[in-house]
Amino acid sequence: MLIEIATLFPEMCEAVLSASIIGRARAKGAITVRCHQIRDYTLDKHNRVDDSPFGGGMGMVMQAQPVYDCWKAVREQSELPMHTIYLSPKGKTLTQQRVRELAQMPRLFLLCGHYEGIDQRVLDRITDEEISVGDYVVTGGELPALILTDAVARMCPDVLPAPDAYEEESHFNGLLEYPQYTRPETWEGESVPPVLLSGHHKNIAAWRAEQSEAITRERRPDLWEKWIKLK
Ligand code: 4FD
Protein backbone atom coordinates (compact mmCIF):
# COMPACT_ATOMS: atom_id res chain seq x y z
CA MET A 1 0.00 0.00 0.00
CA LEU A 2 1.24 3.43 -1.02
CA ILE A 3 -0.47 6.47 0.56
CA GLU A 4 0.26 9.98 -0.73
CA ILE A 5 -0.90 12.86 1.52
CA ALA A 6 -1.13 16.37 0.01
CA THR A 7 -1.25 19.05 2.71
CA LEU A 8 -0.12 22.50 3.84
CA PHE A 9 1.18 20.82 7.04
CA PRO A 10 3.37 17.83 6.02
CA GLU A 11 5.42 18.08 9.27
CA MET A 12 2.25 17.58 11.33
CA CYS A 13 1.36 14.46 9.32
CA GLU A 14 4.94 13.16 9.39
CA ALA A 15 5.09 13.54 13.19
CA VAL A 16 1.94 11.46 13.75
CA LEU A 17 2.89 8.83 11.16
CA SER A 18 6.40 8.33 12.60
CA ALA A 19 5.11 7.13 15.98
CA SER A 20 3.79 3.85 17.31
CA ILE A 21 2.52 1.01 15.12
CA ILE A 22 2.28 3.01 11.89
CA GLY A 23 5.81 4.38 12.41
CA ARG A 24 7.15 0.85 12.85
CA ALA A 25 5.19 -0.45 9.84
CA ARG A 26 6.70 2.31 7.67
CA ALA A 27 10.21 1.66 9.03
CA LYS A 28 10.04 -2.01 8.02
CA GLY A 29 8.44 -1.23 4.64
CA ALA A 30 5.05 -2.87 5.26
CA ILE A 31 3.44 0.36 3.98
CA THR A 32 4.74 3.53 2.32
CA VAL A 33 3.34 6.96 3.27
CA ARG A 34 4.64 10.14 1.63
CA CYS A 35 3.62 13.66 2.68
CA HIS A 36 3.64 16.39 0.03
CA GLN A 37 3.68 20.17 0.61
CA ILE A 38 1.02 21.77 -1.64
CA ARG A 39 2.70 25.18 -1.13
CA ASP A 40 5.79 23.90 -3.04
CA TYR A 41 3.67 24.01 -6.21
CA THR A 42 2.49 27.63 -6.03
CA LEU A 43 3.58 29.97 -8.86
CA ASP A 44 2.81 33.04 -6.73
CA LYS A 45 5.99 34.91 -5.66
CA HIS A 46 4.64 35.20 -2.11
CA ASN A 47 3.84 31.47 -2.03
CA ARG A 48 0.12 32.14 -1.61
CA VAL A 49 -2.19 29.16 -1.95
CA ASP A 50 -5.53 30.79 -1.04
CA ASP A 51 -7.73 33.72 -2.04
CA SER A 52 -11.13 35.21 -1.10
CA PRO A 53 -14.26 33.47 -2.41
CA PHE A 54 -15.96 34.73 -5.60
CA GLY A 55 -19.46 35.86 -4.67
CA GLY A 56 -18.23 37.10 -1.32
CA GLY A 57 -18.44 35.55 2.11
CA MET A 58 -16.16 34.74 4.99
CA GLY A 59 -12.76 33.13 4.94
CA MET A 60 -10.43 32.00 2.18
CA VAL A 61 -10.54 29.31 -0.50
CA MET A 62 -7.54 27.20 -1.60
CA GLN A 63 -6.71 27.89 -5.24
CA ALA A 64 -6.94 25.22 -7.94
CA GLN A 65 -3.47 25.59 -9.51
CA PRO A 66 -1.16 24.51 -6.64
CA VAL A 67 -3.44 21.58 -5.79
CA TYR A 68 -3.62 20.42 -9.42
CA ASP A 69 0.14 20.76 -10.03
CA CYS A 70 0.88 18.89 -6.78
CA TRP A 71 -1.51 16.08 -7.76
CA LYS A 72 -0.01 15.78 -11.28
CA ALA A 73 3.59 15.78 -9.99
CA VAL A 74 2.83 13.11 -7.37
CA ARG A 75 0.91 11.00 -9.92
CA GLU A 76 3.96 10.96 -12.21
CA GLN A 77 6.24 9.72 -9.39
CA SER A 78 4.95 6.17 -9.85
CA GLU A 79 3.19 4.01 -12.46
CA LEU A 80 0.73 2.68 -9.85
CA PRO A 81 -2.85 3.78 -10.49
CA MET A 82 -3.97 6.35 -7.91
CA HIS A 83 -7.36 6.67 -6.18
CA THR A 84 -7.91 10.28 -5.09
CA ILE A 85 -9.85 11.04 -1.90
CA TYR A 86 -10.87 14.50 -0.67
CA LEU A 87 -11.45 14.65 3.10
CA SER A 88 -14.44 16.88 3.78
CA PRO A 89 -17.43 17.17 6.12
CA LYS A 90 -19.64 16.87 2.99
CA GLY A 91 -18.20 13.45 2.10
CA LYS A 92 -19.73 10.02 2.54
CA THR A 93 -19.11 8.78 6.08
CA LEU A 94 -16.18 6.35 6.38
CA THR A 95 -17.03 2.81 7.53
CA GLN A 96 -14.91 -0.25 8.37
CA GLN A 97 -16.31 -1.88 5.20
CA ARG A 98 -14.98 1.01 3.04
CA VAL A 99 -11.66 0.91 4.96
CA ARG A 100 -11.27 -2.77 4.00
CA GLU A 101 -11.96 -1.94 0.33
CA LEU A 102 -9.51 1.01 0.29
CA ALA A 103 -6.82 -1.25 1.81
CA GLN A 104 -7.04 -3.40 -1.37
CA MET A 105 -6.12 -0.45 -3.62
CA PRO A 106 -2.48 -0.08 -4.66
CA ARG A 107 -2.21 3.67 -4.11
CA LEU A 108 -4.28 6.40 -2.43
CA PHE A 109 -3.94 10.18 -2.78
CA LEU A 110 -5.42 12.01 0.23
CA LEU A 111 -6.15 15.70 -0.30
CA CYS A 112 -6.29 17.86 2.85
CA GLY A 113 -8.22 21.12 2.60
CA HIS A 114 -7.93 24.20 4.79
CA TYR A 115 -9.63 27.58 5.11
CA GLU A 116 -13.18 27.31 3.73
CA GLY A 117 -12.31 24.48 1.33
CA ILE A 118 -10.81 24.12 -2.16
CA ASP A 119 -11.86 25.60 -5.55
CA GLN A 120 -14.53 23.20 -6.85
CA ARG A 121 -13.01 23.08 -10.36
CA VAL A 122 -9.89 21.19 -9.29
CA LEU A 123 -11.95 18.89 -7.04
CA ASP A 124 -14.15 18.00 -10.04
CA ARG A 125 -11.00 17.32 -12.10
CA ILE A 126 -9.07 15.04 -9.69
CA THR A 127 -11.38 13.62 -7.00
CA ASP A 128 -12.62 10.02 -7.22
CA GLU A 129 -14.34 10.04 -3.85
CA GLU A 130 -15.19 12.53 -1.06
CA ILE A 131 -15.01 11.04 2.43
CA SER A 132 -15.92 12.33 5.89
CA VAL A 133 -14.65 10.72 9.09
CA GLY A 134 -17.76 11.79 11.02
CA ASP A 135 -20.40 14.47 11.42
CA TYR A 136 -18.23 17.23 12.89
CA VAL A 137 -15.86 19.90 11.56
CA VAL A 138 -12.14 20.32 12.35
CA THR A 139 -9.75 23.07 11.18
CA GLY A 140 -8.08 21.06 8.41
CA GLY A 141 -8.27 17.81 6.45
CA GLU A 142 -5.04 16.54 8.07
CA LEU A 143 -6.53 14.85 11.15
CA PRO A 144 -9.25 13.15 9.03
CA ALA A 145 -6.56 12.03 6.52
CA LEU A 146 -4.46 10.62 9.37
CA ILE A 147 -7.46 8.73 10.73
CA LEU A 148 -8.11 7.24 7.29
CA THR A 149 -4.40 6.39 6.88
CA ASP A 150 -4.27 4.63 10.25
CA ALA A 151 -7.49 2.70 9.64
CA VAL A 152 -6.33 1.54 6.17
CA ALA A 153 -2.75 0.78 7.25
CA ARG A 154 -3.84 -1.55 10.08
CA MET A 155 -5.72 -3.68 7.53
CA CYS A 156 -2.51 -4.20 5.48
CA PRO A 157 -0.34 -7.31 5.91
CA ASP A 158 2.57 -7.10 8.41
CA VAL A 159 1.36 -3.86 10.04
CA LEU A 160 -0.26 -5.13 13.25
CA PRO A 161 1.99 -7.05 15.67
CA ALA A 162 -0.71 -9.72 16.28
CA PRO A 163 -2.07 -11.07 12.95
CA ASP A 164 -5.54 -11.88 14.34
CA ALA A 165 -6.00 -8.42 15.88
CA TYR A 166 -7.76 -6.90 12.86
CA GLU A 167 -10.08 -9.83 12.23
CA GLU A 168 -13.09 -8.19 13.83
CA GLU A 169 -15.03 -10.51 11.48
CA SER A 170 -14.52 -13.10 14.24
CA HIS A 171 -17.15 -13.92 16.90
CA PHE A 172 -17.94 -10.34 17.84
CA ASN A 173 -18.22 -8.84 14.39
CA GLY A 174 -21.16 -6.48 14.21
CA LEU A 175 -21.19 -6.07 17.97
CA LEU A 176 -19.28 -3.71 20.27
CA GLU A 177 -16.28 -5.14 22.13
CA TYR A 178 -16.66 -6.69 25.60
CA PRO A 179 -14.78 -5.05 28.55
CA GLN A 180 -11.14 -6.01 29.27
CA TYR A 181 -9.31 -6.33 32.62
CA THR A 182 -5.70 -6.87 33.68
CA ARG A 183 -3.63 -7.06 36.90
CA PRO A 184 -4.10 -6.40 39.76
CA GLU A 185 -7.13 -8.58 40.57
CA THR A 186 -8.34 -5.87 42.97
CA TRP A 187 -7.83 -2.15 42.29
CA GLU A 188 -9.18 0.54 44.63
CA GLY A 189 -11.54 -2.03 46.14
CA GLU A 190 -12.90 -3.11 42.74
CA SER A 191 -12.33 -6.73 41.75
CA VAL A 192 -12.31 -8.32 38.30
CA PRO A 193 -15.39 -10.34 37.21
CA PRO A 194 -14.69 -13.76 38.80
CA VAL A 195 -15.43 -15.75 35.61
CA LEU A 196 -12.31 -14.23 34.00
CA LEU A 197 -10.15 -15.84 36.74
CA SER A 198 -11.92 -19.23 36.53
CA GLY A 199 -9.86 -20.63 33.64
CA HIS A 200 -13.15 -21.99 32.25
CA HIS A 201 -12.85 -20.98 28.56
CA LYS A 202 -16.43 -21.80 27.59
CA ASN A 203 -17.87 -19.73 30.44
CA ILE A 204 -15.50 -16.86 29.63
CA ALA A 205 -16.58 -16.87 25.96
CA ALA A 206 -20.26 -16.93 26.98
CA TRP A 207 -19.76 -14.06 29.45
CA ARG A 208 -17.98 -11.97 26.82
CA ALA A 209 -20.70 -12.61 24.22
CA GLU A 210 -23.33 -11.60 26.78
CA GLN A 211 -21.42 -8.39 27.60
CA SER A 212 -21.01 -7.55 23.89
CA GLU A 213 -24.72 -8.01 23.28
CA ALA A 214 -25.78 -5.99 26.33
CA ILE A 215 -23.53 -3.02 25.53
CA THR A 216 -24.52 -3.04 21.85
CA ARG A 217 -28.26 -3.14 22.65
CA GLU A 218 -27.83 -0.25 25.09
CA ARG A 219 -25.52 2.05 23.12
CA ARG A 220 -26.10 1.20 19.46
CA PRO A 221 -29.66 0.12 18.73
CA ASP A 222 -28.81 0.55 15.00
CA LEU A 223 -26.06 -2.11 15.15
CA TRP A 224 -28.22 -4.31 17.40
CA GLU A 225 -31.13 -4.34 14.91
CA LYS A 226 -28.78 -5.32 12.06
CA TRP A 227 -27.17 -8.04 14.16
CA ILE A 228 -30.37 -9.75 15.31
CA LYS A 229 -31.66 -9.82 11.73
CA LEU A 230 -28.36 -11.37 10.55
CA LYS A 231 -28.51 -14.06 13.26
N1 4FD B 1 -15.62 15.22 9.04
C1 4FD B 1 -13.83 16.59 8.14
C2 4FD B 1 -13.01 16.84 7.07
C3 4FD B 1 -12.39 18.08 6.95
C4 4FD B 1 -12.62 19.06 7.92
C5 4FD B 1 -12.28 21.17 5.64
C6 4FD B 1 -13.98 21.74 3.53
C7 4FD B 1 -13.39 21.99 5.85
C8 4FD B 1 -14.04 17.60 9.08
C9 4FD B 1 -12.88 20.93 3.34
C10 4FD B 1 -14.25 22.27 4.79
C11 4FD B 1 -12.03 20.64 4.39
C12 4FD B 1 -14.53 15.28 8.30
C13 4FD B 1 -11.36 20.86 6.77
N2 4FD B 1 -13.43 18.78 8.97
N3 4FD B 1 -12.09 20.31 7.89
O1 4FD B 1 -14.07 14.31 7.74
Image: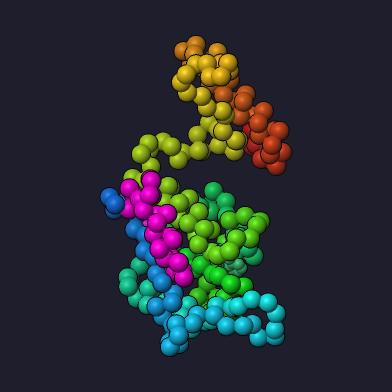
Image: 193 above or below 110: above
Percent x, y of residue 102? 47, 56
Q: Quadrant of ligand 1?
A: bottom right
Residue at 52% across, 72% down? 127
Horizontally, residue 198 falls left or right of residue 209, namely: left
**Left/right of residue 15 with respect to residue 204 in the rendered view:** left
Residue at the image point whose x is 43% and y is 60% from the top: 13
Tell me residue 103's x, y (percent).
44, 54
Q: Quadrant of residue 51?
A: bottom right
Percent of width and height locating residue 112: 51, 67
**Residue 121 seen in this snapshot:** no
- Does residue 69 appear to the left or right of 122 in the view shown? left
Residue drawn at x 50%, y 16% is 185
Q: Residue furthest left?
A: 28
Q: Which residues are magenta?
A: 1-26
Depth check, front residue: 68 or 157: 68
Task: State the image quarter where residue 60 is shown.
Answer: bottom right
If the image is split into quadrants, where does the C terminus sit?
top right
- Residue 144 in the image: x percent, y percent? 53, 58
Quarter holding the N terminus? bottom left
| Residue 9 in magenta stretch | yes
